[in-house]
Amino acid sequence: MNAPSDIQIHTKRRVLLLIVIGVFAVFIGRLYQLQLLYSKEFEDKSKENSVRVISTEPVRGYIYDRTGRLLVDNRPAFSVTIMPFEFDRASIPHLARLLSLEPAFIAERLKRGEAYSRFAPVKIKRDVNVETIAALEEHGELLPGVGYQTESKRFYPTPARATHLLGYTKEISEQQLRVLGSDYTQGDVSGAGGLEAHYERILRGQKGSELSTVNALGQVVGRYLDGAEDKRPIEGDDLLLTLDINLQAYAESLMTGRRGALVAMNARDGGVLAMVSVPDYNLSFFSGVTPPEIWSRLNSDTTAPLFNRATMTRYPPGSTFKMVLALAALQDSIVSPSWRVTCRGAIRVGTKVFKDLHVHGPVTMIDAIQKSCNVYFYELMLKAGLDPWHHMGTQFGFGQRTGIDLVEEQAGLLPSTSYMNRRYGPRGWTRGYLPNLGIGQGELGVTPLQMACYAMAIANSGTWHQPHLVRAIVNKRTGALDVLPFSTHRMEVSARHWLPVREGMRRVVEEQGGTGGLARIPGIQSAGKTGTAQNPHGPDHAWYIGFAPFENPRIAIAVLIENAGFGGSFAAPVAGHCLRFFLERDRLEEEDARPPSIMAASSLPAASSISGEGPR
């Protein structure tokens, strides 16, 4: 066999050398990539292994009434946590006994928390007392990874409940976690209902973080960079409401023992002064952890205390709706205010008889409003037709949400020609459907909030303000008040047409023969309209809407009392007492004379602070 030539040997050496150089080039390139190009990425991953990040909860924003009176405060609360990386699952039965929980519950919470991160604390039980925290510390050696966090829970230092208006906070569900996004983790709380839910992002603030250095066993050995990279939580901003808490408390007292709702509004800007829905419940039930038996009781209660009747009901308004038809007929020149109908106590349309409670004789529009003559409005509805009535109702905001800053609101129902055609077919409904709509009966459905807006628009002779509960946001970073904008529009109704309608409402309260005399305020002229809405499931519902003072309206109101009977007998007195209570105080005129922005955040009373320290 011939020995390899020098050329072959030289070639093999060159190939081997190129291979070695290539390998070294790859190593050098990779080293360059790791050390320079990806250095930040791997530095962050290294920190993840050696640095533990603990979120710190912000203090939730406070809520004040229109004068700066504190309505929703915070109090310290303690939550028990488990660090999955450190925790020994054999300790679950012992921990369960200390916390009065089922072991399976702790295991499930721990499993869900580990799926998120083994190095983030999992909240096992919220709102535990100081004695429980002390017991956990005594058994600390047997419960590795078990600790606690100081948080806050809501406290209500007010004379009123304002349950459905304020809302409450609760621990978020898995579904909410997906909706709210990465800013929230298991065990966080969020607003549920009312203002707490609508202004969740503003009230919540931003989480902070504390960084600790840990060893290979996951044990904390000190603060990372002496806390230089810790982030302080940012407190949630505060809400300054339009609410008058004294009026709210008084209105609640008047509605005690009833079922229904009351809404009072500032007629000049749409700010809600009081909003009552009864039955209700005590918000303190939800300020910490709600006992299951209380939640079950509230859900099974047939009076529906969790239901906001002020914004979610859909009852016919009865005779309180008659001014919609009157204005529609005037605006479309269908009749004049002097158009006269002779009321004989009933009319016949086809084979159906539509009755009135009284025989009123000859009545004009003003008379018909004052005496609540059904026959007049039966005849007027037949003369006007459905479309003008529907168009005017739409201008008042019926059949649509008002846009109030609450989560829970429904649009109600304002029947139109297209609606009737869809439901009954173009030939399935006749003129016989119209008379009941003319007196606020039939398929028409409204909320007390919509009715208060309706009263406000009549008080203003056609200026409709968007109802709202929050006057301004107190910016914690600047200390300034950010006044919120809300819409206002003028209705398409000539100024002269408001005069007979408002005069008829004035006579309802102020003159003999009016149906709302029990709403009269000594020394102050007001206007209103009573309504008695038929209820196929029981006694009639009592309605009243009104405003005061008549010449320079400050406040508009709507009252609904379920199954009470005549509006003039039951709803009107409640409204009259509220109007009188509000107007007899001198404070309103002085407050309305100054712009909201001059009430600086620094002038608000101090709320309680939440300490980050544990029990001592």
Image (spheres, helix red, strand yellow):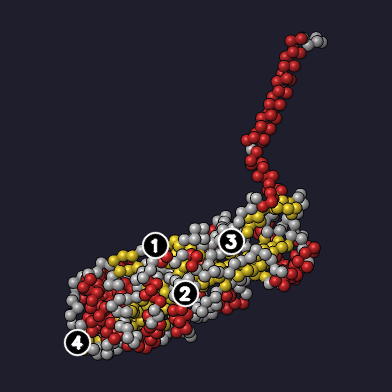
Circle 2: residue type: Asn
The disc label shown at residue 23, or none: none
Q: Distance between the residues labelled 3 and 4?
A: 68 Å
Which mark sits nearer the N-terminus, 3 or 4?
Answer: 3
Q: Residue at x 32, y 83 (%)?
A: 524
The disc label shown at residue 58, or none: 3
Residue linked to disc 1:
485
Element marked by disc 3? loop
Element marked by disc 4? strand
Q: Distance between the residues labelled 3 and 2?
A: 29 Å
Q: Residue at x 18, y 75 (%)?
A: 335
Which mark sits nearer the N-terminus, 3 or 2?
Answer: 3
Query: On the rendered image, what quadrant is the C terminus found in?
Result: bottom right
- State the residue in front, 126 or 418: 126
Find residue 397 and report its horizontal and vertical position in percent: 34, 69
Q: How crowded is mark 2: few (under 14 residues within 10 Å), some or many (20 or more)?
A: many
Residue linked to disc 2:
308
Find residue 73 and report its horizontal and vertical position in percent: 55, 70
Locate residue 160 relative to residue 560 in the image: left or right: right
Residue 424 makes an appearance in the image: no
- State the residue in front, 470 or 448: 470
Q: Relative to residue 210, is residue 427 depicted above or below?
A: below
Q: Which residue is drawn at 25% across and 81% down?
A: 504
Q: How crowded is mark 3: few (under 14 residues within 10 Å), some or many (20 or more)?
A: many
Residue linked to disc 4:
362
Circle 1: residue type: Pro
Q: Quadrant of residue 544?
A: bottom left
Circle 4: residue type: Pro
Q: Relative to residue 433, is residue 44 depicted above or below?
A: above
Q: Distance between the residues labelled 4 and 1?
A: 48 Å
Q: Distance between the residues labelled 1 and 3?
A: 27 Å
Locate residue 384 relative to residue 557 in the image: left or right: left
